[in-house]
Amino acid sequence: MLLVTTQLAQLVMPIEETDTQVILTHPSDPSTSVTILKYGATVISWKQQGTERLWVSEGAKLDGSKPVRGGVPLVFPVFGKQKKESHPTFKLPQHGFARNSTWEFLGQTKELPLSVQFGLGPEQVDPELYKLWGEGKYDFTLILNIVLEADKLTTTIEVENTGSHTFEFNWLFHTYFRIPDITDTLVNNLVDQKCFDQLLAEEYVEKSPVVSFHEEFDRIYKNIPTDKTFQIIEFGKVLVNVERDNLKDTVVWNPWIKKSEGMADFLPKSGYLNMLCIEPGNVSDFVSLTNGEKWQGSQILSIGGEIKIQSNIY
Ligand code: TA6
């Protein structure tokens, strides 16, 4: 059948691969797409009906010289810096090595919903970096599954211990959301959850039904039931819903003015007004995997919908 040019133009390439990136375009909506940098398997763009939903610094390095400042950096096998010198992750850099290793694009796994996979193993990690983790004695496979739907983006990580030594790890999706103005932004359904405040170095129970932002904010909310949905709300409208599967903790972070000024790759410096990190993970303790064991967790991001208040009223 002869397709005229305009119809051909409508034929969307659902998956496009370059040397450094993979771009998924929704089969029936070319204005909905997700771009993944092979370096760190970092999602660096999620456009939903043409609106960019993630924040990436204008100073972000996309050439593999350092982890991307923005998008969805992947944190493994340690969140932050381990304090115990005897811990196998003690010598690793902050947030581990998954976000600064080049992952292998494993291809498409499903037509609908459009799904692709990326993989990481020890052979893809800088040897100098890898031997900092338990003297390099561990063997693992990470498989990242990314599913793009019309108004939803799901990222699932599967961790497998493919070696003979048991290891323990943290996992976190370090997601940077793009928002119109942090000073008009609220996040709900963290109320009554225990959190560790990284700025005060103390633990307390969150008592605000909706959290607002007026200074640097860096809290690890712990052991939150996965039926709780966090909603980023502005002027009574839900921007994004953040749901989790098997990820019991969530970090909420905004660097504010001073911290932003201290990060060379955080640009523009006013960018703190337009970003908010809501980071589902397992970071308040370690997951332990013995030989052959697997673990998986998902972050499910969706757009809009009704405000849903979920508090522990019983
Ligand atoms: O997730 C919050 C956090 O742990 C903050 O404390 C801050 O360090 C942020 O991560 C960014 O870390 P990075 O290593 O990407 O500069």
Image (cartoon, rainbow, N blue to C red):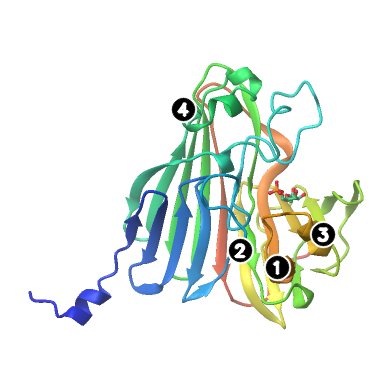
Residue 69 position, x and y percent, is 63, 54
Answer whether labels 1 and 2 touch (C-beta < 8 Å).
Answer: yes
**Label 3's element?**
strand
Q: Residue at x 81, y 31 (%)?
A: 83
Residue that mark 4 sits on: 123
Marks 2 and 3, how far apart in space?
Answer: 22 Å
Tell whether 96 sits left or right of 273. left
Q: What element carries label 4?
A: helix
Q: Where is residue 222 in the image (x, y as percent from the top left)?
A: 77, 48
The reply, left or right, for residue 249 in relation to residue 126 is right
Categorize mark 1 by other alpha carbons within 10 Å: few (<14), some (14-19), many (20+).
many
**Relative vertical location of residue 100 with respect to residue 111 in this rendering, above or below:** above
Q: In which quarter of the image is the N terminus?
A: bottom left
The alpha-carbon separation of the residues under discs 1 and 4 comes to 36 Å
Residue 196 on image: x %, y %: 85, 48
Q: Disc 4 to disc 2, how far (Cα)?
A: 31 Å
Three-letter amino acid code at the position of disc 1: Gly
**Mark 1 in CB contact with mark 3 (< 8 angstroms):** no
Of callouts 1 and 2, which one flags the residue occurring earlier in the amino acid sequence?
2
Disc 2 element: loop
The numbered dot on residue 58 is 2
Query: Which is more foreground, mark 2 or mark 3?
Result: 2
Left or right of 56, for residue 48: left
The reply to whether residue 313 is in sight is no
Q: Residue 271 carries which label?
A: 1
Q: What residue type is labelled 4?
A: Glu
* C-alpha distance separating marks 3 and 4: 37 Å
> Contact (CB < 8 A) between labels 3 and 4?
no
Label 2 environment density (alpha carbons within 10 Å; few <14, some 14–19, many ≥20): some
Please give the residue where the numbered disc 3 appears in the rendered image: 217
* Label 3 within 8 A of ligand 1 by Cβ: no
